[in-house]
């Protein structure tokens, strides 16, 4: 692989990581709102158990993504920064409100209800807004004036393509998070909560899939090129669809406890499903970062910096890996944490 | 207002907001670590309780520190794409390593807070030690990027092309160690005085049980010691920082001191404000020869004046006021801390008027941080990268920056109020007296 391809693959990998972690994180906020006030279920509590220690770590993945893009593709900074100023700023404002109010929610029982609303609503809006970035990179929303890029905001917020993407993002977020939380509830041996999240996931899976297909075809008027190229990469999408079917079947299969569903299998296979689809999408997108103005090659940093960054990422990952493992054990598998008396 | 001005306003206010929480995020974990260690060594439960209560406060601050940091991090790329082009090619390393410091801090903070009951005392100390380490490392690394903007190294620009890149020469630029020590020492100092403020306030208010008084008294003395040591360190190191300016950014030092003519035996100007047209400082006290002495350890040192430089390269002259405020606050806090510790030592307890004097110290330290940073960043104008890139070359060309500025400004004001509100609410609900009665210690 050439240096450039290594760099863009790393960015793709960080993006995927944040898409998973962010979906579960934001989705948990939404489910905490939906189930939080109901006395008959612990579903809200389970969502919060997961959220409390992990949102900071998830947020750091977002920062990692931004820093990695600038580090590897600094020559694209002008284009990316200018084009994305407004949508990303709105995300930042919502993200700030969300984090602040989530922390406040732990400190105060009196104000729980309004605080839950804030974290629930922003949990839907943030992934939705983040998704608007994708169609913007596909072309049609940016014009060049005197060599400086301008984003056509009005067009972005009235385009059906953009809304199809937003819908796909939110549906995926809720599908992924309900799947994950069903597994988390199973780990906590809370059968009733498990069933609730499984039901949600079973309902959302086909919706997410349908939205994905819809979003793809909605691109035809504005960015036909990517649809054509996705067709060239059809194998990945077929594999992804097969993975979806397996995961969905796993949700219905009888398990040893006499109920339905193998949540662990479903989570892992669904992760594979999204990974496969995003390989197909990513390959279709290349070599453009922003169509048709900015390619990977134009944005790429100098070879010396590239090598230093690569060494930096390798060393720091090795150093931090044990801490991540410990963290995972303490909060995702330790029964003393996830299943309090 | 043009886009560049609005971008500067938006960047400045976002950084000014972040730095309040970021500095406390460096200073308070350091205090928590000290309290945990003292608790372990002296087996005094009060220190365990201190660590616990400060951790609660820090957990609330984090809710704002992290997103506001995310804002500035992303905004750097959005508002200053021209700058980030060079950053990405030359000084991407500290930004990148900083991410891992953030991970270190976030992971161990979660472990320290949410797994406290499952950790041994030693593991607790290690966890909070890594939190403090992660926070200090992130301050050090971002300051590295800032130091590089003041003393850029590791590349050269020819016809708009970036050539001869040497990432490590950029990382180890000449001002990084002085600047980073100054930032860290002043952050530890601010954390300590924040504790001083609260302890003094609690000791002043109402009749308190002896047990509770003792608790606040211990916190106060510990924090005063740390505050004194760190503010002395900040001042000594500030001297080194000023010498760094003398060597590498003479026009910034000249603007800070309102010095127009290059001269040996240059005077130090205290107070007043600088008038560029009449080339005078209005209302200042002059200490003859002192500036030369501070800049080069000798009265014969020749200090460059502003007239050496073209007028359009002068920093804004109001930085003199900012510089004076920072130095004044530093000197005042050293004096207050030393005096209070002395009185505490001979009388064993502080008078109400002395406690009242201690209440504003935390706020003053934060003011010192704000004025220091604004001095440093504004004093670099018109350059974003000193003598390499003008601020207007760094800025975005996007529209809407003005609208965003007002949007973000409202967000910051709103969050300041709400954070204060929840902080009060929380500590009202869990007063020290109740914690002490429960005898509940992490
Ligand atoms: C509580 C905070 C505080 C206090 C009491 C002081 N400083 Fe400071 N100072 C800072 C907090 C700070 C800072 C906010 O951390 C800065 C801003 C940028 C930086 O590197 O550190 C800074 C910058 C800064 C600079 C500019 C560096 C640059 O532009 O690169 C100088 C010359 C000094 N300081 C000198 C001093 C002196 C002589 C002090 C005497 C007591 C002093 N500072 C006290
Ligand atoms: C341009 C300047 C700065 C940028 C781009 C920046 C960036 C960031 C980012 C992205 C975060 C969030 C990290 C996360 O997601 O966990 C953060 C938090 C933090 N920043 Fe800043 N920062 C800047 C200035 C500073 C300075 C000057 C200091 C040191 C005094 C500092 C200290 C911290 C600390 C300690 C945190 C962790 C939050 C906490 O634990 O309280 N930052 N910063
Ligand atoms: C966190 C504390 C900081 C504060 C309060 C602060 C304050 C400011 C202010 C007031 C401005 C506007 C200057 C003007 O237009 O007159 C500014 C600009 C800027 N600062 Fe800082 N700064 C801080 C830290 C940093 C750090 C650590 C970096 C480097 C990574 C940095 C990079 C910049 C950049 C790129 C600009 C815009 C370009 C320019 O005006 O030169 N700042 N900052």
Image (cartoon, helix red, strand yellow):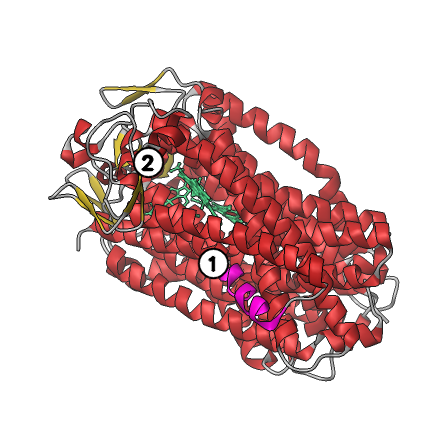
* Res. A16 mark: none
State the SS at label 1.
helix
Name the magenta segment's main secondary structure. helix
Mark 1 and ligand 1: say if the CB distance to the nearest ligand atom is below 8 Å. Answer: yes
Q: Which of A289 and A331 is in front in this view?
A: A331
- Tell me which image quadrant ligand 3 sits in: top left
Q: In which quarter of the image is the C terminus of chain A?
A: bottom right
| Depth order, front residue of B246/A112 | B246
**Side of B296 where B103 appears, left or right:** right
Residue at 57% from the left image edge and 66% from the top image edge: B354
Q: Quadrant of residue A80?
A: top left
Please give the chain letter of the residue carrying mark 2.
Answer: B
Q: Which residue is drawn at 59% across and 68% down?
A: B355
Residue picked out by circle 1? B364
Is disc 2 placed on a helix, strand or loop? helix
Does A90 lie within the magenta span? Answer: no
Q: Which of B76 and B210 is in front in this view?
A: B210
Compare marks 1 and 2 and give the one earlier in the sequence.
Answer: 2
Q: Which segment did they paint magenta?
A: B351-364
Indicate yes or no: mark 2 CB to ligand 3 under 8 Å. yes
Q: Residues within 10 Å of mark 1 (few under 14, many from 20)?
A: many
Q: Say whether residue B275 is left or right of residue B26.
A: left
Name the residue nearer the viewer: B14 or B289: B289
> On what subunit does the disc labeled 1 rest?
B
Residue denoted by label 2? B83
Between the C-alphas of marks 1 and 2, the distance is 33 Å
Instruction: List x then y, in percent, for residue A163.
Output: 38, 62
Residue B314 left/right relative to B171 = left
Farthest residue in the left direction?
B277
């Amino acid at each position: 692989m050439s240096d450039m391809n290594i760099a863009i693959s790393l960015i793709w990998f960080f993006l995927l990581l944040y898409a998973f972690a962010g979906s579960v994180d934001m989705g948990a906020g939404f489910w905490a709102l939906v189930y939080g006030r109901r006395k008959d279920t612990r579903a809200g509590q389970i969502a919060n158990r997961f959220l409390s220690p992990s949102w900071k770590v998830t947020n750091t993945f977002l920062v990692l993504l931004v820093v990695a893009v600038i580090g590897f593709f600094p020559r694209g900074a002008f284009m990316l920064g200018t084009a994305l100023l407004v949508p990303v700023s709105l995300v930042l404002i919502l993200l700030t409100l969300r984090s602040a109010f989530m922390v406040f929610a732990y400190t105060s029982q009196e104000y729980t209800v309004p605080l839950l609303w804030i974290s629930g609503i922003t949990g839907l809006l943030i992934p939705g807004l983040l998704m608007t970035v994708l169609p913007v990179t596909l072309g049609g929303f940016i014009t060049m004036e005197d060599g400086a890029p301008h984003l056509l905001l009005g067009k972005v917020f009235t385009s059906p393509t953009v809304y199809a993407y937003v819908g796909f993002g939110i549906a995926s977020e809720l599908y992924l998070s309900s799947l994950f939380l069903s597994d988390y509830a199973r780990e906590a041996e809370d059968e009733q909560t498990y069933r609730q999240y499984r039901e949600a996931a079973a309902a959302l899976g086909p919706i997410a899939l349908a939205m994905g297909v819809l979003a793809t075809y909605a691109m035809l008027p504005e960015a036909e090129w990517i649809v054509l190229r996705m067709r060239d990469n059809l194998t990945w999408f077929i594999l992804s669809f097969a993975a979806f079917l397996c995961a969905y079947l796993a949700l219905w299969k009888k398990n040893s406890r006499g109920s339905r569903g193998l949540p662990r299998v479903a989570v892992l296979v669904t992760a594979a499903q999204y990974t496969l689809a995003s390989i197909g999408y990513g390959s279709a997108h290349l070599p453009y970062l922003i169509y048709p103005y900015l390619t990977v090659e134009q944005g790429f940093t100098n070879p010396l910096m590239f090598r230093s960054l690569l060494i930096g990422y390798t060393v720091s990952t090795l150093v931090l890996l044990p801490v991540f493992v410990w963290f995972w054990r303490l909060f995702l598998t330790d029964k003393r944490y996830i299943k309090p008396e | 207002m043009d886009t560049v001005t609005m971008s500067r306003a938006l960047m400045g206010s976002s950084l000014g907001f972040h730095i309040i929480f970021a500095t406390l995020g460096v200073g308070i974990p350091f205090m928590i670590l000290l309290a945990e260690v003292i608790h372990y060594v002296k087996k005094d439960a009060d220190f365990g309780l201190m660590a616990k209560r400060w951790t609660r406060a820090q957990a609330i601050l984090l809710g704002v520190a992290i997103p506001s940091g995310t804002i500035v991090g992303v905004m750097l790329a959005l508002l200053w794409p021209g700058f980030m082009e060079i950053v990405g090619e030359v000084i991407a390393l500290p930004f990148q390593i900083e991410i891992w410091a953030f991970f270190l801090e976030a992971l161990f903070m979660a472990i320290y807070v949410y797994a406290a009951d499952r950790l041994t005392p030693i593991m607790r100390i290690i966890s909070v030690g890594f939190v403090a380490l992660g926070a200090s490392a992130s301050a050090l690394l971002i300051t590295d990027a800032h130091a590089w903007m003041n003393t850029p190294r590791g590349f050269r620009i020819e016809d708009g092309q970036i050539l001869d890149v040497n990432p490590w020469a950029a990382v180890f630029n000449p001002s990084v160690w002085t600047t980073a020590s100054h930032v860290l020492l002043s952050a530890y100092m601010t954390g300590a005085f924040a504790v001083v403020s609260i302890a003094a306030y609690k000791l002043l208010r109402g009749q308190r049980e002896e047990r509770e008084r003792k608790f606040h008294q211990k916190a106060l003395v510990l924090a005063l010691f740390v505050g004194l040591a760190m503010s002395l360190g900040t001042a000594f190191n500030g001297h080194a920082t000023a010498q760094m300016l003398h060597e590498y950014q003479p026009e910034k030092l000249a603007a800070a001191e309102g010095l127009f003519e290059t001269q040996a035996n240059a005077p130090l100007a205290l107070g007043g404000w600088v008038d560029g047209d009449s080339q005078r400082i209005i209302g200042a006290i002059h200490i003859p020869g002192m500036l030369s002495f501070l800049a080069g350890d000798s009265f014969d040192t020749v200090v460059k004046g502003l007239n050496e430089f073209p007028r359009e390269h002068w920093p804004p002259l109001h930085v003199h006021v900012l510089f004076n405020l920072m130095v004044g606050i530093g000197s005042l806090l050293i004096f207050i801390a030393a005096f209070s510790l002395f009185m505490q030592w001979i009388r064993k307890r502080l008078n109400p008027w002395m406690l009242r004097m201690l209440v504003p110290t935390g706020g003053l330290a934060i003011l010192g941080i704000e004025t220091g940073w604004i001095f440093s960043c504004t004093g670099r104008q018109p350059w974003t990268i000193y003598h390499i890139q003008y601020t207007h070359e760094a800025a975005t060309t996007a529209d809407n920056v003005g609208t965003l500025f007002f949007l973000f400004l409202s967000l910051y004001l709103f969050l300041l109020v709400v954070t204060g509100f929840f902080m009060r609410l929380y500590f009202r609900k869990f007063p020290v007296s109740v914690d002490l009665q429960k005898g509940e210690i992490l």
